[in-house]
Amino acid sequence: MRPPSCLTLLALASVASVASVRLAVADTPVIVLDSSVVSGSRSASETFDLPFSVDSISREQISDGQLGINASEVLQRVPGLVVQNRQNYAQDLQISSRGFGARSAFGVRGIKLIADGIPASTPDGQGQAATFNLDTAERIEVLRGPAATLYGSNAGGVIQMFSRDGEGAPRVGAETLIGSDGMSKNHLTAEGAVEGAGFVLDASRMDTDGYRDHSAARRDQTFAKVNLKPDDDSKLALIYSSLEQNGTQDPLGQTWQAYKDDPRWVASNALTYNTRKSIDHQQLGMNYERSVGEATLQVNAYGGRRSVIQYLSIPKGTPANARGGGVVDFDRQFYGGSVRWLQPISSAPGELTMIAGLDYDQSQDDRHGYQNFVGDTLGVKGSLQRDEIDTATSLDPFVQANWLLGNWTFQAGVRHSSMKLDVDDKFLSNGDASGDKTYQKTTPSVSAMYAFTPTLNGYVSMGSGFETPTQAELAYAPGSVEGFNFALDPSTSKQIEVGVKALLGEGTRVNAALFQIVTEDELVVAESNGGRTSYQNAGRTLRRGFELGVQSQLSEQWSTQLAYTWLQARYDDDFVSGSGATAKAVDKGNYLPGVPRTTLFGELKWQPRDWVSTALEGMYRSEVFVEDTNAAKPAPAYAVFNWRARFEQRVEHWTFHQTLRLDNLLDRQYVGSVIVGDGNNRYYEAAPGRAWYAGVGVEYGF
């Protein structure tokens, strides 16, 4: 960590810059207690008027005193979400929604990720939140509960990011951010509109040495968007984005004792095999919308490629090396699209809109595996151990109705989801693992809301959903059996939610929801040995919870936000995890690993003028179990506090801003994330101690 004097100098420089320019002072803004979203209803609607749990995170919340690096910076303010920053850019964030996705050892599972209508999740449910470019975000919408099942399989929740359109006079900008553990981010942007055509161009580079040893990363992101109006009845957006990470180091997890002795500790195998990962991701998308009389046609199409090479720490000579090896290498091509027709029914009483649509997605991996050694040289690409083509395809038709009838609001829909995984094994010396399996299910959802008063709505929402295993979860069968685990079934769920939405006075919004989720054939870790993790179905689980969101403008200068979640997630059946000598009995009543019972986020913000704001953030998380028997040491509960400030000045065509941020003010040592069911008992990933960040930026408007 850099010495405090650096932070002091940066703070003084920021204060001096504030005093040295003419400030643009206007009326103090107030927070927006309601916002418009499209998640769930498929058309723009106020969150207060929708009969399910949905939240919107605004552009101001995404950028105000935040780093713009990880979605965890802002998603923690949404009830029902648990967002764990692994401090490991090789494995990405772990995100769960009401317990869905908590089992993920890397990336995001069980939650649908979408950016500008382009899925950031593959058809089998694997997703990467790193593809979200926060620097260009206009808003992030988070849909939870039964209504999320209208987005198909693997939609225990839906997180959608929408980039802003290019508007107004053209302008260019630059920003530099530095901070603890060698973190730096340089960012260039240009946006605006010329003769009716809007554009947003953005490029950034982030470097960090990482809090833990062997966790350095470099991430380059680019983004380009052009938005047009071909005629008075239509609009078109073309979007390109890329993500590149070369040689991102992976420190692996930590045992409990190693974490206690040194939170920066890294497993010796990580150094011996130089565990690391490289990603090259590029995609292009198109969104088109046209008014046809009273109806609206929406068309989306996208395509892209993703290349990954990852060096694992599987020890030389491990029998599991027989298939797969210690180097993962694949080239993915993905494409798809959707079409939706929104038709108002003017002959029906009230306001009725019918929606019909079709979503198609395909992801094809040219996948190879290699040994991670050549002779006595470790951590290099060795002999070929795996060669196959894995193709995941989904085709989902759906219909939906949104109906406002007096004080009642109804929403109902049904979707038929079908996902086929096909494996063409070309490495036959260890047998033919080729095969295919199709998962399909029809999932209905219905919601109803009643407006007791203009400021008090009550609702109930019910639905069913299902979650397919991902390609990675199907890759290995339990025990010594080689080949894909096509015997693995999808999990199915039945969900119910009851909630209220209230406006108290002129400045406070309250959302509260009770929910229950019953899941059959829950997907859980069966075994994790020698770099191979296999999965099994575990019978029934029961999740019951309560969510509370409060947003309040206390005065012209003070505002606050609170997000509280209580979630009891337990196994509702006994089962045996694994097989043979490693089998373990899991009792009914055990807690699902990776799911804290209580999470709490609070923020108190002071904005005396529009050119300065400062806020105190606090977050509490209860203990988290790390494996199914609940016998291993759970990650302890913790509470942390952060402080941030942002200043802005305007001088004619120029706008300057400065950002200061202190995370973990009390310098607590705590486990920030866990790796569920790790076979080496390295379940824990330490979070940083006290960390500082400071940034300056400038924008010129033409």
Image: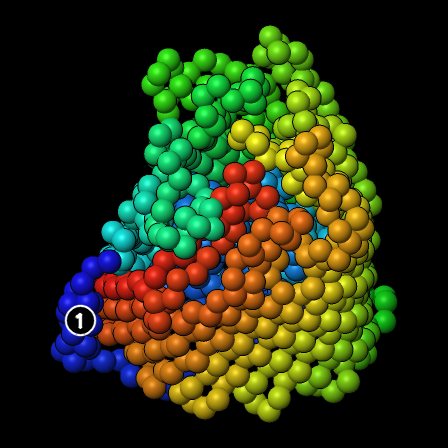
| Image coords of residue 678 (percent x, y) | 55, 41
| Image coords of residue 468 (percent x, y) | 71, 40
Task: Give the residue at x 50% y 34%.
Answer: 304
Q: Residue 531 or 656: which is nearer the viewer?
A: 531
Residue that numbered label 1 is attached to: 8
Task: Give the residue at x 68% y 57%.
Answer: 591
Q: Does residue 416 appear left or right of residue 321 in this picture?
A: right
When asked about the image quadrant of residue 25, the answer is bottom left
In the rendered view, would you say 517 is above or below 274? below
Which quarter of the image is occupied by the C terminus? bottom left
When asked about the image quadrant of residue 659, the answer is bottom left
Task: Give the residue at x 16% y 74%.
Answer: 12
Task: Give the residue at x 55% y 54%.
Answer: 633
Residue 36 shows in the view: no
In the rendered structure, which amino acid carries the disc numbered 1?
Thr
In the rendered view, would you say 136 is above or below 504? above
Q: Does residue 54 appear left or right of residue 374 in this picture?
A: right
Q: Does residue 34 appear left or right of residue 673 in this picture?
A: right
Q: How is the image coloured?
A: rainbow
In the rendered view, would you say 618 is above or below 69? below
| Image coords of residue 418 (percent x, y) | 76, 37
Label 1 packing within 10 angstroms: few (<14), some (14-19), many (20+):
few
Which quarter of the image is occupied by the N terminus? bottom left
Q: Does residue 7 appear left or right of residue 534 in this picture?
A: left
Residue 591 shows in the view: yes
